[in-house]
Image: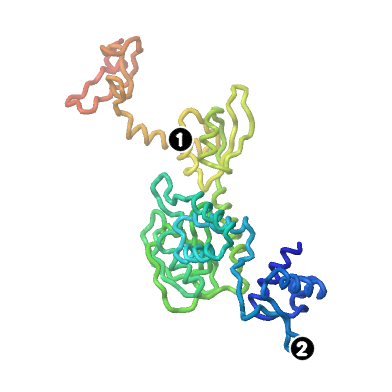
Amino acid sequence: MKADRLVATLLLLQARGQVTAREVARELEVSERTARRDLEALGTAGVPVYSQRGRGGGWQLVGGARTDLTGLTAGETEALFLATALPSPSPELRSALRKLMRALPAPMRSRAEAATRSVMADPQDWSRTEEGAGGEHRRALERAVLDGEQVVLGYAPPGRTPTERTVHPLGLVSKSGRWYLVATQDAGGRPRTFRLGRILSVTPVGEPAHRPDGFELTSTWGELTRRMDERMSSATVYGRADNDVLPLLSQLFGGRLRVTDTQPDGRVGFTVDGPSTQALTARLAGLGERVEVLGPPEARESLARLGKTLVAAYGGYQTGSHFPLGTYYSADANVQNVPARSTVRPVRRGSSAAATSPNPHSSGSSS
């Protein structure tokens, strides 16, 4: 469109100070004749542009005049100001947007102001963990990446003792609201990730960081996520579940849940992938009898061990009934129509004496 070309020509004049029709034509991929007509059209529209003939001549803005025209469309402007909804935008970003606001034409300024008031982001999730902005060390890591400087990280891997590691920062990535540093621990080493929420400190070393030849953050991150996906899918568990529990399963496992079929009784078959059988069964156990794990055998064994552990820990816990969980005899005053069992009645918590029932196999007693 001609209007787009005129804006592009004006911005080119503003950036270079002086241009020839040939330079404009080459830059905008049009003919010299079209470029010359566009330059003349700017003058006709009131832009203070003039031409100087001869060797070293060209088109210039009178007196180095500048315009507050940004060259941004309304949609682009709104998208920029919606970026202020990012968790904890940096002071530099806020300052840049204030300057841009002053430079915008009046009709676009009102839309930009509305955009800043229309969206917000709360970086704290429901577990009260705040990590959406990348943590307090993000700015230091951004500087290290841009300056190409090694840093010492104080890092706390999950379940392990915090350590200090000297790394070569290569880039920062935000994935689903969590920030990661991509870095190597040795010059020429294999890139790996460090989650910013686990970084305790960042100390510049003063030594240049080694950046691998041909390093490209997008492709490196793709390889890292591929390896992580492989680790996250190293175990598979299958079973069946009540139909109404599918939303919970989907919430627990996301895209790693696959529904395989519908059973005659209305239950659904499913498979889920995860980093280990133990990790998968630990999550499934919370759904109780609404989910039945069918395999592999080690998954059922894992659930059985977990069940025994829970019974050992909570088997005597008193619920709303008079007696704790356990096995009872019909001779008990508050238990009616319960057949006798050859087990010892569990001791009530808090009782000073152990109330026992005779073993019918050894004493010949009956209910």
Q: How many marks?
A: 2
226 with respect to 10 (left or right): left
7 with respect to 202 (left or right): right
Q: What residue lies at 24% left-to-right and 25% top-to-bottom?
A: 348
Between marks 1 and 2, how big is the CA–CA gap? 85 Å
Residue pushed farthest bottom? 55
Disc 1 target residue: 285
Local packing at callout 2 (Cα closer than 10 Å; few below 14, some 14-19, many 20+) is few
Q: Which mark is first along the chain, 2 or 1?
A: 2
Q: Secondary structure at mark 2?
A: loop
Q: What residue lies at 63% left-to-right and 62% top-to-bottom?
A: 72
As drawn, 178 above or below 164: above
Q: Can you say which quadrant of the picture contains the C terminus?
A: top left
Q: Position of residue 141 (x, y in %)?
A: 46, 67
Q: Amino acid at mark 2?
A: Gly
Q: Amino acid at mark 1?
A: Ala
Residue nearest the viewer, comparing 4 with 280: 4
As drawn, 254 above or below 84: above
Residue nearest the viewer, comparing 274 with 320: 320
As drawn, 286 above or below 80: above
Q: Position of residue 261 (x, y in %)?
A: 64, 31
Callout 1 touching callout 2 (CB < 8 Å):
no
Q: Can you say which quadrant of the picture contains the N terminus?
A: bottom right
Q: Secondary structure at mark 1?
A: helix
Q: Position of residue 31 (x, y in %)?
A: 82, 73
Disc 2 target residue: 54
Local packing at callout 1 (Cα closer than 10 Å; few below 14, some 14-19, many 20+) is some
Can I make out residue 182 in this image? no
Q: What residue lies at 41% left-to-right and 64% top-to-bottom?
A: 137
163 with respect to 192 (left or right): left
